[in-house]
Image: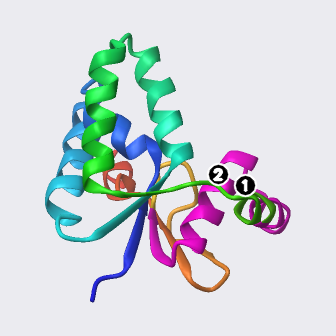
């Protein structure tokens, strides 16, 4: 049985925006090949952030809605509950991440995820002894 995997907003944005060709290709490969068949988890926060980010790239509401439909179809979407919110405050204090990143961490942990794919947090860091942060672009960064 495969583990739950949480995917942060930036991975989906890179998969849909090709300004950075390397990150675009890596995000698409991650989502379509490496994570194919895995149980991908996202939160409603990820969907909201995705909409906002894609709007900044001047994508139409219709196009963003279509992209969101694709994400919703391939992932399990969880809501942010009050206990998740409260847990994020504890994680923020303990690990020093931003509030928004701490909310992502809390949602991932409460969903039983073992891996969190994100560009925004420290690659390889283990949170609460069970959640590993993985930056899928980390090896590409080393090659510069």
Which quadrant is home to the C terminus? Answer: top left
Look at the image and tell me whether residue 125 can be seen: no
In the image, residue 56 lies in the stretch drawn in magenta: no
Q: Is residue 7 above or below residue 50?
A: below
Residue 2 locus on image (x, y percent): 29, 83
Q: Give x and y (percent) for residue 114.
A: 47, 78
Residue occupied by mark 2? 101
> In percent of the image, x 33 and y 24: which residue is there?
64
Crowding at label 1, few (<14), some or many (≥20) Cα neighbours within 10 Å? some
- Which contiguous range is marked in magenta? 87-116
Horizontally, residue 36 falls left or right of residue 114, namely left
Closer-to-camera residue (27/124): 27
Say above or below: 124 vs 101. Answer: below
Residue 67's mark? none
According to the picture, the residue beneath numbered tag 1 turns out to be: 97
> If the image is split into quadrants, where does the N terminus sit?
bottom left
Across and down, in percent, residue 26 comes to 23, 48
Quarter residue 66 falls in: top left
Examine the rendered structure and indicate whether residue 25 appears above or below residue 2.
above
Q: Are marks 1 and 2 in contact (CB under 8 Å)?
A: yes
Q: Quadrant of residue 125?
A: bottom right
Magenta: predominant secondary structure element?
Answer: helix
Disc 1 versus disc 2: nearer the observer: 2
Q: How far from the left and from the top, in percent, is residue 23? A: 29, 40
Q: Residue at x 36, y 81 (%)?
A: 3
- Residue visible at 24% across and 27% down? 18
Res. 19 in view:
yes
Would residue 98 be counted in the magenta stretch? yes
């Amino acid at each position: 049985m495969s583990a739950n995997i949480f995917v942060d907003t930036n991975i989906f944005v890179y998969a849909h925006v090709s300004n950075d060709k390397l990150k675009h290709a890596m995000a698409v490969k991650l989502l379509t090949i490496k994570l194919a068949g895995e149980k991908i988890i996202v939160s409603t926060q990820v969907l909201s952030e995705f909409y906002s980010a894609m709007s900044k790239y001047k994508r139409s509401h219709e196009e963003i809605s279509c992209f969101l439909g694709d994400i919703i179809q391939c992932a399990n979407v969880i809501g942010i509950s009050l206990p998740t919110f409260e847990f994020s405050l504890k994680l923020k204090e303990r690990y020093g991440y931003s509030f928004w990143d701490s909310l992502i961490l809390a949602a991932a942990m409460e969903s039983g995820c073992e891996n969190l794919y994100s560009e925004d947090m420290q690659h390889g860091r283990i949170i609460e002894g069970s959640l590993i942060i993985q930056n899928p672009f980390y090896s590409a960064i080393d090659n510069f």
